[in-house]
Amino acid sequence: MPAPTQLLFPLIRHCELSRIYGTACYCHHRHLCCPPPYIPQSRLRHTPHPAYATFYRPKESWWQYTQGRRYASTPQKFYLTPPQVNSILKANEYSFKVPEFDGKNVSSVLGFDSNQLPANAPIEDRRSAATCLQTRGMLLGVFDGHAGCACSQAVSERLFYYIAVSLLPHETLLEIENAVESGRALLPILQWHKHPNDYFSKEASKLYFNSLRTYWQELIDLNTGESTEIDVKEALVNAFKRLDNDISLEAQVGDPNSFLNYLVLRVAFSGATACVAHVDGVDLHVANTGDSRAMLGVQEEDGSWSAVTLSNDHNAQNEREVERLKLEHPKNEAKSVVKQDRLLGLLMPFRAFGDVKFKWSIDLQKRVIESGPDQLNDNEYTKFIPPNYYTPPYLTAEPEVTYHRLRPQDKFLVLATDGLWETMHRQDVVRIVGEYLTGMHHQQPIAVGGYKVTLGQMHGLLTERRAKMSSVFEDQNAATHLIRHAVGNNEFGAVDHERLSKMLSLPEELARMYRDDITIIVVQFNSHVVGAYQNQE
């Protein structure tokens, strides 16, 4: 059958409103996301509960699904052509190169490539990148939403402003506040680097600005007048926690505007993880909340690549996280706080923005829902109280911050949501990006390890290498090249066009069963500048 039109023309990410588990869908392309399909529990950020299990289709295998819908007497294979595959893969790619001054790049960052491939409709992942204008450095981040895209959208718009404000010196904060008071033009804080599809919510801009202003006013009041150096780690932690607090407060207070009132509630009741990098010279800080990851690509002296993990997953596979949760709650909850590798048996990430169902008291949840709009009050998911819910909050947005001092051998950083890490090992990710950026694998001789190979086997190896080369030339974006491998790799680690075509041709009700949304940012470092920093010391 022909490929779905929406795969070739991915309009779904223009939807500015998403659903909360499908019961209150305000998507402009309603037919793309309603009704929600059945998704295996292992693929869900939230485990379906009987209270809203009726919103999911009965279980049926892919074979049953396809057999029950096969109308042609003779099965016909359909594959997307290479141009069609490229159209899908490149639809959301974005690249930025740091400008040069006097023919030289004085930044430790050469530039970055980013891309997204949706599995959900609409996509629940978001990405952001910006240059700090009043302080030094660049901010880059990926955000993985669940129970809709409302929270990830809000965090992708707002978090960098909170970080930038947290990094500003007292004098600059006063200057900005005085400009607002007198009605003068504000100093620009950030220069955004966005794909046209990475939109901002114009309707909520005033509300968001007022909350941000309250934050910087408090920072001004807290200043003792002593000139102190800004601690980047502390600034990142404060920004994460303050934004999550504002998301919660805005939902509790509400808004006279019915659209905004429903928006702030949807943001608070959905959730998002975040993995953010701040690069300033040779100082690299990674703040992570949830299970997205930051991976450093290091080139060894022999030209090989190694991966250095700069973040920890906040989930059941992290024993320290499980222990932290148990220590924060009474001993009689030790068996229920983490159940079936999920928070309270429901949520996969143990840290996240939003998700007030795991933070608010039961009384507060009921009060907000009862006084909220009908769409919220009629939603079974929002009314559902998690089991064994005795001592909230069970969830935090506080990030874990990792510091790394860049070295000349640190060539790039990969920030990606868990959709990538579920399909590829970190070492393969770093190797593929490293080979793409340097092209070194083109010159390496074919190694057969001392084994005897036939002429046919050698021909196969040469053909495989030629396919890899054509794939590299096909992509002008490192994130796109990585997504091509994540979706199309066969058991030998090579991109199989037939497999890639099949995966990209899956209808929306099946795509989410095989993979998650994938969002990737690849940041390339300037080894010459990094080396110069080292020589100055």
Image (spheres, rainbow, N blue to C red):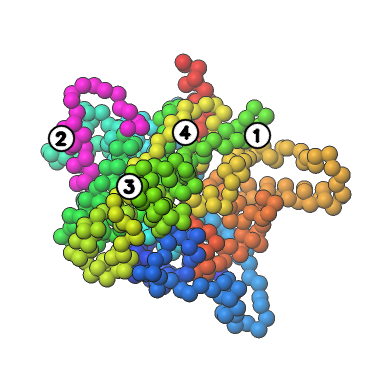
Q: Which residue is mark 2?
A: 178
Q: Is residue 217 magenta?
A: yes
Position above or below: 157 against 401? below
Upstream in sequence: badge 2 or badge 1: 2
> Of the residues shown, which amino acid type is indicated by label 1?
Ser
> Of the residues shown, which amino acid type is indicated by label 3?
Pro
Q: Which residue is mark 3?
A: 330
> Of the residues shown, which amino acid type is indicated by label 4?
Val
In the image, 435 versus 429, the foreground residue is 429
SS under mark 4: strand
Badge 1, how many Cα within 10 Å: few under 14, some, many 20+? few
Nearer to us: label 4 or label 3:
3
Upstream in sequence: badge 1 or badge 3: 1
Upstream in sequence: badge 3 or badge 2: 2
What is the spatial separation of the Cα atoms under label 3 and label 2, in whole angstroms? 48 Å
Q: Residue at image x 64%, y 61%?
A: 499
What is the spatial separation of the Cα atoms under label 1 and label 4, in whole angstroms? 22 Å
216 sits to left or right of 459:
left
| Residue range highlighted in magenta | 209-234
Question: Looking at the image, do the residues carrying marks 1 and 3 touch, with CB atoms under 8 Å apart?
Answer: no
142 sits to left or right of 471:
left
What is the spatial separation of the Cα atoms under label 1 and label 3, in whole angstroms? 49 Å
Upstream in sequence: badge 4 or badge 3: 4
SS under mark 3: loop
359 sits to left or right of 482:
left
Position above or below: 265 against 73? above
What is the spatial separation of the Cα atoms under label 2 and label 1, in whole angstroms? 54 Å
